[in-house]
Every structure is written in C-alpha cells, then in structure tokens.
Image (spheres, rainbow, N blue to C red):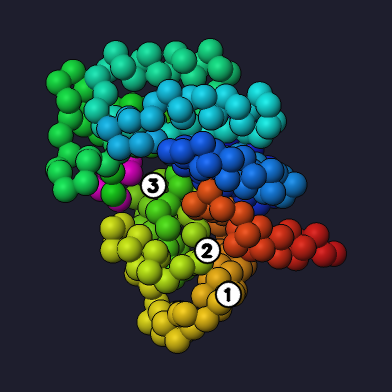
Amino acid sequence: MRIDQVLRSNAPVFSFEFFPPKTPQGVDQLLHTIDELKPLAPSFVSVTYGAMGSNRGQVIELVSLIKHQIKLNPMAHLSCTGHTRDDLAAILDELAREEIENVLALRGDPPKGEEFRAVPGGFAHASDLAATDLRNLQTKVRAGVDFLITQLFFSNRDYFAFVERARAIGVALPIIPGIMPITDLAQIKRFTSMCGAKLPADLLARLEAADGRAGAVLAIGVEHAIEQCRELLRGGAPGVHFYTLNKSPATRQVLSALREELARP
C-alpha cells in the first residue's frame, strides 16, 4: 500500500528502518528483529541503501522478502550516488516487478572521506529522482514527493521549528519525525557527530553518569524516546519513524508503551 494513502488516516503512523546486513549472522539477526517487531503492526518499514549503491541487489531482495513472505509494507531507499540514469531506471523497473510501491528518493552519501560527485550520466540531487536542506524542500515537493521523514534528533524543539519553517514556505506535506532510541553512548556520540544532531546537555549528563552500568543507558534512552514521541504526537506529528539499527528491544519498548497509551479510552 502506498504510504501517502496510509498517512491519510487519522491514526498515528509508526514505522521502522532497517539496513541490509553484511553477513549471514546479520541476516539472521535482522529476521529475528523483524519477527519481534511485526506484532506491533508497523504501517511500513524502510530498507536503507549502501554507499555508492553497493548493495542494490540485496535491498531489492530484502524488500521483496518483507512484502511477499513477511507480509509487511516495505519502502526501498533509492540513492543517486554512483548510478547513471539508466541504472536508476533499471532499479525502478526491478522494484516495480517485485510490486514495491514505495521509494524514498535520496541524493545519497559519498564514500567516507570523499565529497559527493554525480557520476557521468547520473543525477546530482534527489529532486532529479522524483530532490536537499530547507532551501531545496520546495524543489522536492514540486518534484512529486508525498511525505518527508526527518533525520534523527533528540530535542523536539528542532522538529517543531523545522515544521514551522517548512509550513512558512508553503510545504504542507506530512513530515514524519525520525527517532533513534539511545542504547549505547559511544555509538550515539559517533552518529550525532556524523549527521550534525545534538544531544541536549541534561540528557548527555544523565547518559554519561550512567555509562558503564549494565542496562542504565538503555533505560534512559528508552525513557527519553517515549517522552519525545508523546510530545511529538501531542504536537501534531503524523507518526514516528524509528531508526532500529536492526535491533528490536529499545524500539519494541518505546512503541509498546505508546500503543498502550493510545489504546486507553
């Protein structure tokens, strides 16, 4: 089912992001994670794309498995990086043959340590696929996107300010917040340094005080994510997209708590 149709319902939309594993053990871990998260009835799940399209075939295989055998609604990431127009057309044809209706168009990241360069005969922007920061948001919308998903963040003020700026320039599409429950302090510091997200000072202090105690960082991360999601939904967010890192416990705890609250009269 198309995600833009799902977003027309009045109920919050909850979704998960996975990445294609690099090893057979990783595949087993991902399938176990999906099995544990499936009972939470996500509206859709997305599958990321490797640097320079390195795992193109694996992404198509995985989204097909998710749709036809696991029976969840998949969305395939599609990146310009490393692909010509003909490459991208062929990928879209493969996805269409697998009856994949949803694609997340991205410019994509270059290999680590390199700057982005469009390949000869390729695209330079995600807008060419459908479109990057607030300046180009209108371009993406005009190119035909149906909804937007944010990068991870830990202060809801960042999300609400972004939505306000988007609305001020006429972008009325649903903007789904992306949430990553914190499970490992060193890992989340690494992620935030790469993507530019910031940990609020009070949250960082709590995490650093808890670091080294078994389960303490996870408990704080889950608690923060639940509070984030509650406030986001109360503030009008259309749902939540969870960055799972192919693991289920933290995401399962957060979404289970939200589902319980939403089910109360």
Residue 65 vertical placement versus 190 (above, below) = above
Number of the label disc, if any, that sits on residue 170:
3
Circle 2 is placed at which residue position? 181
Describe the element under mark 1 as helix, strand or loop.
loop
Q: Are marks 3 and 1 in contact (CB under 8 Å)?
A: no
Q: Which residues are magenta?
A: 134-139
**Residue at 49% over, 52% down:** 245
Who is closer to the viewer here, 168 or 144? 144
Q: Amino acid at mark 1?
A: Gly
Mark 1 and mark 2: Cα distance apart in space? 13 Å
Q: Amino acid at mark 2?
A: Pro
Mark 3 and mark 2: Cα distance apart in space? 31 Å
**Residue at 49% over, 59% down:** 180
Pointer 3 or 1: first along the chain: 3
Give the class, few, some or many, for how many residues have Cα within 10 Å of label 1's Cα (few <14, many ≥20): few
Picture coordinates of residue 182, whole percent (x, y): 49, 67
**Residue at 38% over, 59% down:** 162
Circle 1 is placed at which residue position? 215
Give the class, few, some or many, for how many residues have Cα within 10 Å of label 3's Cα (few <14, many ≥20): few
Q: Are marks 3 and 2 in contact (CB under 8 Å)?
A: no
